[in-house]
Image (tube, rainbow, N blue to C red):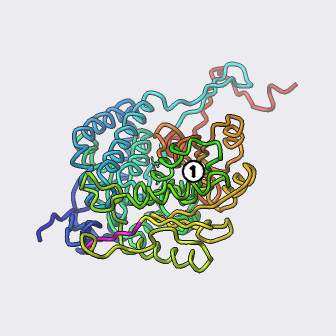
């Protein structure tokens, strides 16, 4: 079979990895379908890319922000024109169904237009000085070269959450695509290049986390790192970056709960739970992986949920009638298998699924059945640890307070949902749920780009993407202009 070979993008040139080696990008729906060969890069490729980004920073930082933003607008328009092709490429390399990959490209389009508006804002503050004839203000400055390490589950949207705010702020970038999904980053960057992005402002270095991610995080000329991935890897990224005092934005795991109260609209809660748990084959950090059911509706909800989950059509995401695509790679299947074993050993009851699918149309892909566990208690590992697959736990509770306590009783804090018609409870939940994102009568997935995205506890280290990313990708400069024509000493000359 013939397939295209891709190179790194360094200083505007497409260059093979210095190793000469490549990594094959396989379609998870059918491993005989090779999407392409991508560079297997190492520290020397990272060094070249960082040097190119450093050189480009000297001029990019001087391009007026509204002009930088115009490139984002043009890139957004190109993404709109190429949406269908890029969505198909993404389904082929990542597996999720076409409706969702179209949504992923759309999220990058939304981000382009949202962030482009920042080109004419990037607001700072003016404030009075304590001294006469002295002017005080703060302005946002770019950081320099930033390293972006991106995941495979939103292979275009999440890179856009990092690239676009970094660029409009005047930084230059070295981006490492996820090993499983480099093509979508290539497509995104191609749109930027075609929109007129100058050479070296964005550089792509493809390869594994150890070979590319580590040298990128450790490089002395990289001023900040933005990472999305697992909490285990994020912790290592944070530790390595600390050695050179780099700011690091970490977006990591979730174990998101949907709470269903007795008074909820049950049809709505079922729709939300199915979409939240099995959309993207459960491979979102915002995925619903715990459904907390009040006793009065638990039996009916469970029966109807399992009944509907059994009807989900699993298959190749390029088939428009398919609802659940494959998992991204064999490692993810192994994790799902492992957690099924753990849950069974803990005494959870397998209500459906629990197996990888290997026969017939599934023979050449990495498929896992939608899996539902009942009789789960909050202390079980299946109720506490992230699976990142189509595996969901049902947990019963009696009171609202108990539901909040269970929802909060985990290390993660990304997203949470409450289904109820009681407005008082809704507002109490908004206040009390320990989650960076909280939904009322909507599933745990589906964040929009112009709100803050991120979580508390082990989900993140306090930064936000979306509305908040500019704060990460800029640093404040305090500026004083003294027009008194004499030495004025703060804290001294104006003291009584
Ligand atoms: C992720 O799961 O990594 O809120 C990101 C959502 C999407 C983004 C998810 N807009 O579900």
All told, the count of numbered labels is: 1
Q: Is residue 213 left or right of residue 425?
A: left
Q: Is residue 171 left or right of residue 246?
A: left
Quadrant including the N terminus: bottom left
Residue 372 at what x, y percent from top left?
51, 65
In the rendered image, the vertical position of residue 487 relative to residue 269, given as above or below? above
Considering depth in this image, is 17 or 251 the residue closer to the camera?
Answer: 251
Question: Which residue is most to the left?
Answer: 2
In the rendered image, the vertical position of residue 16 relative to residue 144, given as above or below? below
**Magenta stretch: includes residue 367:** yes
Considering depth in this image, is 209 or 60 the residue closer to the camera?
Answer: 209
Kindly state the secondary structure of the residue where label 1 is placed.
strand
Residue 298 at what x, y percent from top left?
62, 55
Q: Is residue 341 left or right of residue 5?
A: right
Residue 344 at what x, y percent from top left?
56, 77
Q: Residue at x 25, y 59 (%)?
A: 92
Q: Is mark 1 within 8 Å of ligand 1?
A: yes
Residue 238 at what x, y percent from top left?
56, 63
**Magenta stretch: includes residue 140:** no
Q: Residue at x 41, y 38 (%)?
A: 168
Q: Which residues are magenta?
A: 364-369
Q: Residue at x 48, y 56 (%)?
A: 277
Quadrant including the C terminus: top right
Residue at label 1? 415
Tell me the chief SS of the magenta region: loop
Q: Is residue 122 left or right of residue 323?
A: right
Q: Is residue 283 visible?
A: yes
The quadrant where residue 243 appears: bottom right
Q: Is residue 205 visible?
A: no
């Amino acid at each position: 079979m013939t397939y295209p070979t891709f190179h790194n993008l360094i200083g505007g040139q497409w260059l093979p990895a210095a190793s000469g080696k490549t990594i094959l990008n396989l379609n998870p729906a059918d491993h005989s379908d090779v999407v392409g060969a991508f560079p297997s890069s190492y520290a020397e490729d990272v060094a070249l890319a960082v040097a190119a980004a450093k050189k480009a920073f000297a001029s990019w930082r001087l391009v007026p922000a509204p002009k930088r933003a115009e490139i984002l607008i043009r890139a957004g328009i190109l993404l709109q024109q190429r949406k269908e092709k890029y969505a198909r490429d993404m389904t082929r390399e990542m597996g999720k169904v076409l409706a969702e990959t179209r949504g992923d490209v759309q999220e990058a389009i939304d981000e382009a237009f949202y962030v482009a508006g920042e080109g004419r804002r990037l607001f700072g503050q003016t404030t009075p000085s304590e001294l006469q004839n002295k002017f005080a203000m703060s302005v946002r400055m770019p950081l320099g070269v930033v390293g972006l390490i991106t995941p495979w589950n939103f292979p275009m949207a999440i890179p856009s959450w990092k690239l676009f705010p970094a660029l409009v702020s005047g930084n230059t970038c070295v981006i490492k695509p996820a090993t499983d999904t480099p093509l979508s980053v290539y497509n995104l960057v191609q749109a930027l290049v075609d929109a007129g992005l100058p050479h070296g402002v964005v550089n792509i270095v493809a390869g594994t986390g150890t070979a590319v991610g580590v040298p990128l995080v450790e490089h002395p000329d990289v001023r900040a790192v933005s990472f999305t991935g697992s909490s285990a890897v994020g912790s290592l990224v944070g530790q390595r970056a600390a050695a050179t005092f780099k700011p690091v934005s970490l977006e990591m795991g979730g174990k998101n709960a949907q709470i269903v109260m007795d008074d909820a609209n049950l049809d709505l809660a079922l729709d939300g739970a199915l979409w939240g748990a099995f959309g993207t084959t459960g491979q979102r950090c915002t995925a619903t992986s715990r459904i907390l059911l009040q006793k009065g509706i638990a039996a009916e909800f469970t029966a109807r949920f399992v009944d509907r989950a059994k009807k989900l059509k699993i298959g190749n995401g390029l088939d428009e009638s398919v609802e659940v695509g494959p998992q991204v790679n064999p490692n993810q299947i192994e994790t799902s298998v492992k957690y099924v074993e753990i849950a069974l050993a803990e005494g959870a009851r397998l209500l459906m699924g629990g197996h990888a699918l290997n026969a017939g149309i599934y023979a050449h892909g990495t498929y896992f059945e939608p899996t539902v566990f009942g009789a789960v208690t909050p202390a079980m590992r299946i109720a506490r640890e992230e699976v990142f697959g189509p595996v969901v736990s049902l947990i019963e509770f009696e009171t609202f307070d108990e539901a909040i306590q269970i929802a909060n009783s985990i290390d993660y804090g990304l997203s949470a949902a409450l289904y109820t018609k009681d407005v008082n409870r809704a507002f109490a939940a908004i206040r009390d749920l320990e989650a960076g994102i909280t939904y009322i009568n909507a599933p745990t997935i589906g964040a929009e780009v112009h709100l803050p995205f991120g979580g508390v506890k082990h989900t993140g280290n306090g930064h936000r993407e979306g509305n908040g990313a500019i704060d990460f990708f800029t640093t404040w400069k305090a500026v004083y202009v003294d027009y008194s024509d004499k030495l004025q000493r703060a804290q001294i000359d104006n003291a009584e």
